Amino acid sequence: MLIAALALGTFAIRFGGARLGQAIPAHGPVARALNALPGCLIVALVATSMLSGGWREWTAGAVALAAAVVTRNVPATMACGIATIWTLRHAF
Amino acid sequence: MSSSSSSGGFFAGARDIAPLAFGVAVYGLAFGLLAAQAGFTPLQIGVMGLVVYAGSSQIIATQQWMAGAGLLASVLAGLALNLRILLMTASIRDLFAGQPLWKTAFGAHMTADENWALLLAARARGREVGYAYLVGGGLTQTACWCASTVLGVVFAKVIPEPKALGMDFAFTAAFIAIARSLWRGRPDLLPWLVSVAVVFGGVKLAGAPSHWMLALGGLVGAAVAGARRDG
């Protein structure tokens, strides 16, 4: 029951979004907002995961950001972030 | 949809998601461990991964279920966490334009944080990727998620904690990198700052649940961008 209800609800959300997107006009303020939405959601996502972190997480976040700016590469940034957090948690 | 629906798009999506799928697998093992404690069988968990395919909501719903929250409260907790996916599938509407209903339904079901963000990051770099890229990443990740959660249930006794390996930070780092590639320049600054401020303000000052503030922060930031003329 839990699985079926969660599956149905989650699918309704995903499919609803895809249909909703088709109904929105291609130009104007709503379209501009929709274009900006992905970036805003991603930084909000990063913000929520940093919220619960202490100085180790924030340091690792800063290292990851520097790695992202320099390398522009997802795996390289992940490697730098994980290596930093692992080192900080084991050294301090 | 000539170039974007080619097999190259599919395999490019599968290849790009590989490092993230590794992180997903670590989480899958940890979730399998939790699910075993909640009394789920490997088969149930495999089916759950396939039909729900939204890891964090599966974890929350299972935790609530174990804590005796009841069916309705457990499902609602999981669904609240998934509301952001509505905004995600809406934001890639061009992928679903003119597609038959079953392809829209399938593509929507395959949309998760990781392959959605990678699709946008690839586009920001000028790569022509579309529906096939999204589904290629989605199917790869579903396979990793289902397999690892089932293994987690089966080998529940011998699995290390992801946090001890630093793997809990894997996705934060990945999304920082993806945000970097979505950065289009100065006009993004204000909406992004507003999004972050809404999340921090809502959670720290008002004590609101972070999954609500995530969706609200994204929406308010996007509204700021929409209200301006230079967006």
Image (cartoon, rainbow, N blue to C red):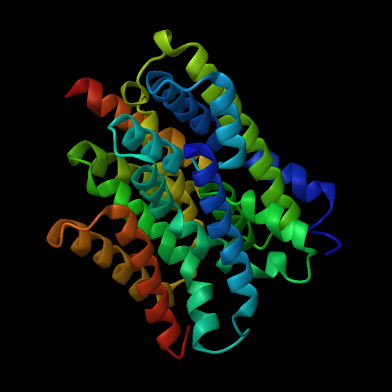
Query: Above or below — where is B228 with respect to B150?
Result: below
Q: Position of residue B130 (x, y in %)?
A: 72, 59
Q: Position of residue A67 (x, y in %)?
A: 42, 45
In the image: residue B205, left or right of residue B66: left
Residue at point 84%, 52% (across, down): B6
Mark yes or no: residue A87 visible: yes
Work out whether residue B125 or residue A40 is closer to the camera in this orientation and state it.
Answer: A40
Q: Position of residue B31 (x, y in %)?
A: 43, 27
Query: Above or below — where is B98 with respect to B89?
Result: below
Residue at point 55%, 41% (across, down): A4
Query: Above or below — where is B135 with respect to A86?
Result: below
Residue at point 70%, 48% (across, down): B135
Q: How many marks?
A: 0
Mark yes or no: residue B180 visible: no
Work out whether residue B149 or residue A55 is closer to the camera in this orientation and state it.
Answer: B149
Residue at point 24%, 20% (across, down): A90
